[in-house]
């Protein structure tokens, strides 16, 4: 044991010295050559990666200082953790996709380099074309630090075949009858479940753990998890209680929503309705049933829409922030934004039209795009985010679990949620 | 290295001493052996000892260092925070439930595992061809990849999964196993027991087969029935194995991670959040490396206490040791 | 809990012939209860075996089912419409072949490495007298008592500084030389302690050095202990989950357990059939090796120094 002590000291010294040197940052070299850029992404879709590569090739042809651009797919499930670990290990990518729930952490910490100046000064970029609402999440001190490359509205998909089989009105008929609201959907869903044993409506990827996906429901009740400034919890508001009462009733009484621990995959034909992002439409050609697309049903507070967002940022701890910002300016210019629109609904006002989006989503009809997608993007609200999102997410999940039992005391659980997260929000 | 030759002038004598069968001659040059053995000993244990230094003792020391710092990865800052992380430990409302969950898991696992292992071993301890077959069945989960095993149980334990399907066939409405606190904990324990009980079973089997037939016969002649035979003769005789499996199982129980991560992610609520999972969450998911280090100290303290307790048990409880 | 279920089986055996049996022949009378008990005994064993066997069975068969059949309720025992879709997808979604190779080569390197490290150290602690021996053995035993989870945070930071995060080095180095190898050293020491000293004495008189004695005399005798160490180590490394989760970031470097939990589509939705196919491919080969060599497997473990 005696010999361990000096070694420990050496270990500490070595590690701390390395840590200190790691913090000193890297000097910017304005005339960088042979730059290898790396962008972390969470898609491993080959068509999408091929498109990125073709954009990069085009850029490199005109920019000899960039030797290569690598798109590095990381698993979606722990994308943010993995990215953070790379940053911790001094292996920050030059550019990174950022999930909207991680946006506050990345924006507030200074992990992202400012890009606004570069974008504004790039010829033909048309910076002012970027949608105001879409960029709100990605600004630090009023300056843009990430480009919102995907603004994808949440919509309701319906399995018309299943609805017909259950003797229920289709989504279009429900809308025509003026019954396109959550109560109506829940009733039809309950009838489908009773008639066929399949699920009524599914909030995709909620799975009774990823609770922030429920924002697509509670927004209809005018509820929010915390105040605008993020400082105080509003889970215990009456609106939230009503929204959760609806969900609880759907899961345990009406059985219009599959209960906890039950899996129903809409795209495998196991559910009548599902709420998810429009980008999922790409799964539909394989589904093998007649489907329809509708805006989110109305809540007691009327109609509303929600969008999911993702940004591309330049990592401040990367080695070539300026070169990376210039590449981003090319990657997201009007021309490339239109190409990307095939998979990622753009945040440019001039491209939020039926023509561009119809070209991007061949599965959908022009009417569906005009009635659902365009208004969804234009009026969609991003679900509220917060710094320390991982810890808040976990705390809320843990406290909220108590609500998913048949005889839960909803207001009591919701106030316990607030009790659990208040210390984190106040920080 | 081990053949370093001595430089003494009386080398020839030493060599002749080495090959001489006469012990008296060897005793005259004990130092040369000792020295060589000393060097050989150090070289032999060096990889292991240095490994333990580098990967156990130094990190153990560093935990103390990290526990008084906070590392903000995104901002790129590493700052001294003093006792802040320790203060947090005492105000953390989740610490007590986490320690409780850890305790319940360990006790439940050890008890259920050892009892089932002993039961199976006793049942299989007879001479029949079929016993090998059953032994293979009970042991097979040990070699199935842990995560694969856990994923499959995760399917089966869903509300509409295989377990409840089977229960329904016999008219029982099964609980929603992974969604209710007590059954979720029970599920994590049971899945782990079925996975590894075969190992302890095999160790018990070997121990049972080592119990001398004569002793059992003698006891039977003295009128002992099966139960007294088992509790008074067999159990004491295999007590070293029981203690060994107890130690292995309880230390192993503190390391449970994959099962929790795959089956319940610590839920519902935090009812299955055991200490190691909590540590992982704090350090690697929430980026609180400092607090994670404090939790590691807590885990270390628990292991230390257990070790002392086991030491005491060993003295008192084990019937004999060879 | 159910010890009394078998206790009667042993105690009652042969003592009480059932009174209300009308079968006259004596031979039949004596055999009947015995066979009945046999039937009950094997019945109980078979029921007990269900939770050990059914999950594996279900995993293998379900990996050939289309996704809607996986969730059919109650579960089917045999795929009605067998498909290999899950298997094809498993390789398409992730570099599964590469991940398989990663797991395999890491496990082999660590297993062989551990056999060397632990047999050397175990031999020295058992057979060689050197100064500080007991102290060093205590130091090593610390590794047995401290779960590697305790040191994961500082280890991560050390490897991070060494630029070894997102490489296989942490997995290989820590498993071979660190805490996980201590159990192996312990097993080897227990084995070598029981070796008769005369063999070494004779070898020494033949002029063999320590290294040669270890390699030529001790190791060939230690086959069963080495087998136990190999099995333990292989299974341990094959199952590692926390460490790869912490150290490895890119899918090309993932090991199997880690890969298994990441069969999700681009939005985080679970791909059940693919996951089951991958799980089957992970579990089946080891299972087959085990069934073929189960005698050596089980007895090797049982006869290792673990007997205490």
Image (tube, coloured by chain):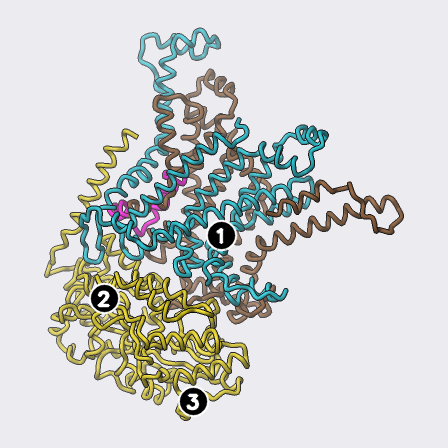
Residue A309 versus residue B112 in the image, above or below:
below
Crowding near the residue tagged with mark 1, few <14, some 14–19, many ≥20 C-alpha atoms within 10 Å:
many
Marks 1, 3 in one chain: no
Residue ranking furthest to the bottom: A176
Chain A as rendered: colour = yellow
Question: Residue A297 at what x, y percent from top left?
Answer: 37, 83
What subunit carries mark 3?
A: A
Q: What stretch is highlighted in magenta?
A: C157-181
Q: What element carries label 3?
A: helix
Q: Do the residues labelled 2 and 1 touch (CB within 8 Å)?
A: no
Q: Which of B291 and B11 is in front in this view?
A: B291
Chain identifier matching the cyan colour in the rendered picture? B
Neighbour tally class for label 2: few under 14, some 14-19, many 20 plus, Cα within 10 Å: many
Which of the chains is brown?
C
Q: Distance between the residues labelled 2 and 1?
A: 38 Å
Q: Mark 1 points at which residue?
A: B189
Q: How far apart are marks 3 and 2 (CA)?
A: 39 Å
Question: What residue is at 38 percent from the left and 74 percent from the top?
Answer: A244
CB under 8 Å between callouts 3 and 2?
A: no
Instruction: Find numbered disc 1 in the image and state the secondary structure of the residue it sits on.
Output: helix
Q: Position of residue A64 (x, y in %)?
A: 17, 64
Q: Of callouts 3 and 2, which one flags the residue occurring earlier in the amino acid sequence? A: 2
Pointer 3: what residue? A174
Q: Where, by quadrant of the figure, is residue A12 drawn?
A: top left
The quadrant of the image that shows the N terminus of chain B is: top left
- Residue bearing the label numbered 2: A104
In this orientation, which residue lies closer to the viewer: A291 or A258? A258
């Amino acid at each position: 044991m005696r010999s361990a002590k000096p070694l420990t000291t050496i270990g500490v010294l070595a590690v701390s010295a390395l840590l200190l040197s790691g913090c000193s940052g890297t000097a910017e070299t304005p005339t960088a050559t042979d730059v290898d850029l790396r962008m972390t992404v969470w898609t491993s879709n080959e068509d999408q990666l091929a498109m990125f590569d073709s954009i990069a090739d085009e850029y490199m042809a005109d920019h000899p200082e960039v030797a290569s651009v690598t798109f590095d797919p990381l698993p979606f499930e722990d994308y943010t953790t993995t990215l953070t670990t790379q940053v911790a290990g001094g292996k920050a990518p030059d550019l990174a996709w950022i999930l909207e729930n991680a946006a506050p952490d990345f924006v507030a910490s200074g992990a992202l380099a400012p890009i606004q100046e570069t974008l504004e000064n790039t010829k033909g970029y048309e910076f002012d074309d970027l949608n105001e609402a879409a960029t709100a999440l990605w600004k630090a001190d009023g300056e843009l630090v990430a480009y919102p490359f995907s603004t994808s509205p949440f919509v309701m998909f319906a399995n018309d075949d299943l609805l017909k089989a259950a003797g229920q009105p289709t989504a279009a008929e429900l809308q025509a009858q003026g019954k396109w609201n959550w109560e109506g959907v829940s009733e039809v869903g309950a009838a489908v479940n009773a008639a066929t044993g399949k699920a009524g409506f599914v909030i995709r990827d909620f799975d009774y753990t990823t609770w922030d996906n429920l924002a697509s429901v509670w927004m209809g009740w005018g509820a929010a998890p915390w105040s605008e400034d993020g400082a105080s919890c509003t889970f215990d508001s009456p609106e939230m209680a009503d929204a959760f009462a609806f969900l609880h009733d759907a899961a345990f009484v009406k059985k219009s929503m599959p209960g906890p621990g039950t899996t129903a995959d809409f795209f495998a034909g196991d559910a009548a309705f599902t709420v998810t992002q429009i980008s999922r439409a790409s799964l539909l050609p394989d589904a093998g049933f007649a489907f329809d697309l509708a805006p989110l049903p109305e809540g007691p507070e009327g109609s509303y829409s929600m969008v999911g967002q993702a940004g591309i940022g330049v990592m401040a701890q990367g080695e070539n922030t300026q070169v990376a910002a210039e590449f981003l300016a090319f990657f997201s210019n009007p021309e490339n934004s239109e190409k990307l629109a095939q998979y990622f609904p753009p945040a440019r006002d001039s491209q939020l039209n039926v023509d561009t989006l119809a070209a991007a989503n061949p599965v959908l009809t022009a009417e569906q795009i005009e009635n659902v997608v365009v208004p969804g993007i234009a009026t969609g609200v991003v679900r509220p985010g917060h710094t320390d999102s991982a810890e808040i997410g976990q705390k809320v999940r843990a406290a909220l679990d108590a609500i998913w039992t048949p005889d839960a005391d909803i207001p009591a659980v919701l106030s316990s949620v607030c009790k659990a997260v208040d210390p984190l929000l106040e920080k | 290295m081990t053949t370093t030759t001595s430089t003494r002038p009386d080398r020839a004598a030493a060599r002749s001493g080495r090959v001489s069968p006469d012990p008296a001659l060897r005793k005259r040059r004990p130092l040369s052996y000792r020295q060589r053995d000393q060097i050989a000993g150090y070289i032999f244990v060096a990889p292991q000892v240095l490994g333990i230094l580098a990967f156990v003792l130094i990190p153990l020391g560093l935990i103390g260092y990290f526990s008084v710092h906070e590392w903000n990865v995104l901002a790129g800052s590493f700052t001294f925070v003093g006792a802040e992380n320790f203060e947090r430990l005492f105000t953390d409302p989740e610490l007590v439930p986490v320690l409780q969950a850890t305790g319940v898991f360990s006790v439940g696992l050890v008890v259920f595992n050892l009892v089932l292992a002993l039961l199976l071993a006793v049942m299989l301890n007879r001479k029949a061809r079929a016993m090998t077959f059953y032994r293979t069945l009970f042991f097979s989960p040990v070699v199935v990849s842990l995560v694969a095993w856990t994923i499959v149980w995760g399917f089966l334990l869903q509300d509409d999964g295989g377990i409840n399907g089977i229960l329904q066939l016999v008219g029982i409405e099964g609980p929603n196993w992974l969604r209710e606190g007590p059954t979720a904990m029970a599920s994590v324990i049971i899945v782990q027991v079925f996975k590894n009980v075969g190992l302890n079973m095999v160790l018990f089997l070997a121990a049972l087969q080592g119990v001398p037939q004569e002793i059992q016969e003698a006891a039977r002649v003295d009128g002992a029935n099966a139960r007294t035979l088992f509790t008074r003769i067999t159990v004491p005789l295999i007590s070293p194995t029981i203690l060994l499996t107890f130690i292995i199982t309880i230390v192993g129980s503190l390391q449970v991670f994959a099962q929790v991560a795959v089956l319940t992610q610590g839920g519902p609520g935090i009812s299955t959040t055991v200490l190691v999972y909590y540590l992982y969450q704090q350090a690697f998911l929430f980026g609180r490396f400092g607090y994670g280090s404090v939790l590691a100290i807590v885990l270390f303290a628990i292991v230390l206490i257990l070790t002392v307790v086991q030491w005491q048990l060993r003295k008192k409880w084990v019937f004999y040791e060879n | 809990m159910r010890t009394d279920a078998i206790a009667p089986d042993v105690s009652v055996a042969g003592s009480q012939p059932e009174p209300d049996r009308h079968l006259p022949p004596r031979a039949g009378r004596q055999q009947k209860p015995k066979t009945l008990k046999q039937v009950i005994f094997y019945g109980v064993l078979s029921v007990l075996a269900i939770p050990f066997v059914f999950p594996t069975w279900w995993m293998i068969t379900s990996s050939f089912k289309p996704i809607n059949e996986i969730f059919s309720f109650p579960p089917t025992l045999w795929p009605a419409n067998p498909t290999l879709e899950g298997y094809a997808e498993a390789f398409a979604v992730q570099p599964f072949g590469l991940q398989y190779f990663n797991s395999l080569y890491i496990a082999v390197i660590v297993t062989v490495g551990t056999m060397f490290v632990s047999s050397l150290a175990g031999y020295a602690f058992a057979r060689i007298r050197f100064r500080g021996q007991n102290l060093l053995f205590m130091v090593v035993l610390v590794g047995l008592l401290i779960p590697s989870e305790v040191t994961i945070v500082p280890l991560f930071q050390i490897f991070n500084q060494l630029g070894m995060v997102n490489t296989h080095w942490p997995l290989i180095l820590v498993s071979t030389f660190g805490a996980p190898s201590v159990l192996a050293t312990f097993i080897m020491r227990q084995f070598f302690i029981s070796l008769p000293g005369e063999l070494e004495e004779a070898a020494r008189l033949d002029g063999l050095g320590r290294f040669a004695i270890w390699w030529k005399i001790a190791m060939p005798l230690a086959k069963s202990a080495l087998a136990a160490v190999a099995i333990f180590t292989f299974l341990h490394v094959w199952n590692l989950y926390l460490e790869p989760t912490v150290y490895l970031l890119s899918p090309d470097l993932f090991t199997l357990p880690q890969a298994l939990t990441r069969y999700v589509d681009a939005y985080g939705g679970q791909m059940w059939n693919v996951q089951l196919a991958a799980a089957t491919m992970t579990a089946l080969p080891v299972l087959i090796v085990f069934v073929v060599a189960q005698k050596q497997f089980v007895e090797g473990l049982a006869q290792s120094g673990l007997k205490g």
